[in-house]
């Protein structure tokens, strides 16, 4: 899977650009605020149907423009396809096209046609920040790869919202407590599904990430992971029925505390995973370079698992990935990544790759070096 050509019109700081890309590494060099990340954003939009930076689509329009166009020719599913999105200012809905035919929605008609895995500097917070982004990493990946996972996650979230409302309001209406047993039962059933799926995916992700980290770091450090869930669940990799029974015990143990606090105190909505580097907590002791290397290894592992599950290797998008990496790790990213197309942005103009093309980005214009 690869993007062969990208055409932009009135997108961010690009008035008009038409670029042919290498099937290997594509390295984009330039100072800050020249348009490097904007280019990756456009590629990612064709893959996901959304921006990883903008809250509103009109934010992606060139200043003063009434519309923006992103059009990509991609080789996917053993054939060439054209993906096109037109974004408008104001409330006018976007227009989506697949091979020239207008589509109703991205999720139903275009999702999965072109796959990407994105690394951006904000991803460092996944390993250094609170638990929420780590859960979101697992949930986003599983929603793409496991049929039914997103439905289970949506239903769990809906039930959790209702239970929290009951726990908050039961003082005013004690009859609400009669509803709790049914909500608890269903929460535990869907919760067991989430825990079992997350733990299994993290185990597979950890194995791949460990291999990539050994290559990138030169074998001096070992990356490992540990899934953290409620204490009653002794084995998150075990049978779903065993996890379900453990969650029931947890609910019974916390019943009084939940009534007093007015909120659901534990469950997979509070789960987390911990990352270790040679046995030490990366969150507590990892340097910026070590954290960045681990985050990159996670993205490479995510790419491997998508290839393993779908048979298609997603395009790897690496934004400002070389900062704070030593020469050995930079060389690994620039010249020794294997197995698919890679797009990399970098602020240092002296960087080069032997595995593809190098581009210079200046004020919304791209030229081959």
Image (cartoon, rainbow, N blue to C red):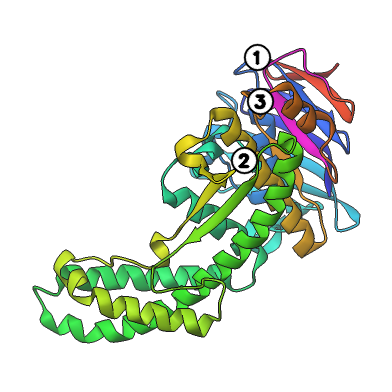
First-in-chain label (2 vs 1): 1
Q: What is the secondary structure assignment of the residue under circle 3?
A: loop
x and y, in percent, of residue 295 in the image:
61, 41
**Seen in the image, is 194 located left or right of residue 312?**
left
Query: What is the spatial separation of the Cα atoms under label 2 and label 1, in whole angstroms?
Result: 26 Å
Is residue 53 at least partly visible in the picture?
no
Q: What is the secondary structure assignment of the residue under circle 1?
A: loop
Q: Foreground: 139 or 165?
A: 139
Q: Which mark is residue 308?
A: none
Residue at the location (79% across, 37% down)? 342
First-in-chain label (2 vs 3): 2
- Residue 342: in magenta span: yes
Contact flag, marks 1 and 3 (Cβ < 8 Å): no
Q: Depth-wise, is mark 2 or mark 1 nearer the camera? A: 2
Q: What's the magenta region?
A: 341-352
Is residue 82 shown above or below 139?
Answer: above
x and y, in percent, of residue 192 in the image:
48, 76
- For disc 3, the marked residue is 325
* Quarter-of-image position of residue 61: top right
Q: Depth-wise, is mark 1 or mark 3 nearer the camera? A: 3
- For disc 1, the marked residue is 31
Query: What is the spatial separation of the Cα atoms under label 2 and label 3, in whole angstroms?
Result: 11 Å
Is residue 298 at least partly visible in the picture?
yes
Q: Which mark is residue 294?
A: 2
Residue at the location (47% across, 68% down)? 154
Q: Foreground: 115 or 86?
A: 115
Residue at the location (28% across, 65% down)? 265
């Amino acid at each position: 899977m690869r993007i062969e050509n990208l055409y932009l019109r009135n997108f961010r700081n690009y008035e008009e650009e038409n670029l042919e890309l290498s099937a290997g590494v594509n390295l984009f060099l330039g100072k800050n605020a020249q348009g490097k990340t904007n280019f990756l954003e456009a590629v990612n939009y064709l893959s996901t149907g959304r921006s990883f930076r903008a809250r509103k689509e009109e934010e992606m329009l060139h200043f003063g423009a009434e519309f923006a166009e992103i059009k990509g020719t991609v080789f996917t599913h053993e054939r060439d396809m054209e993906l096109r999105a037109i974004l408008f200012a104001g409330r006018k809905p976007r227009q989506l096209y697949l091979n020239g035919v207008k589509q109703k929605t991205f999720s139903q008609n275009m999702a999965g046609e072109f796959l990407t895995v994105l690394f951006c500097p904000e991803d460092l917070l996944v390993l250094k920040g609170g638990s929420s982004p780590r859960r979101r990493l697992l949930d986003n990946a599983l929603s793409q790869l496991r049929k039914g996972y997103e439905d289970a996650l949506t239903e769990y979230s809906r039930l959790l919202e209702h239970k929290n409302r009951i726990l908050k309001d039961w003082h005013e209406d004690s009859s609400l407590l009669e509803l709790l047993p049914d909500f608890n039962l269903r929460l535990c059933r869907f919760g067991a599904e989430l825990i079992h799926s997350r733990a299994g995916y993290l185990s597979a992700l950890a194995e791949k990430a460990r291999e990539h980290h050994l290559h990138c770091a030169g074998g001096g450090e070992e990356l490992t992971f540990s899934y953290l869930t409620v204490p009653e669940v002794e084995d998150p990799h075990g049978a779903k029925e065993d996890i379900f029974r453990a969650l029931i015990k947890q609910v019974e143990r916390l019943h009084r505390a939940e009534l007093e606090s007015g909120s659901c105190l534990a469950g997979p909505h509070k789960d987390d995973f911990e990352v270790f580097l040679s046995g030490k907590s990366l969150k507590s002791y990892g340097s910026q370079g070590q954290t960045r290397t681990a985050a990159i290894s996670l993205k490479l592992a995510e790419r491997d698992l998508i290839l393993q599950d779908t048979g298609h290797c997603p395009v790897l998008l690496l934004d400002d990935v070389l900062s704070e990496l030593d020469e050995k790790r930079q060389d690994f990213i620039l010249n020794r990544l294997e197995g698919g197309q890679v797009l990399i942005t970098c602020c240092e103009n002296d960087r080069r790759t032997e595995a593809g093309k190098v581009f210079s980005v200046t004020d919304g214009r791209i030229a081959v070096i």
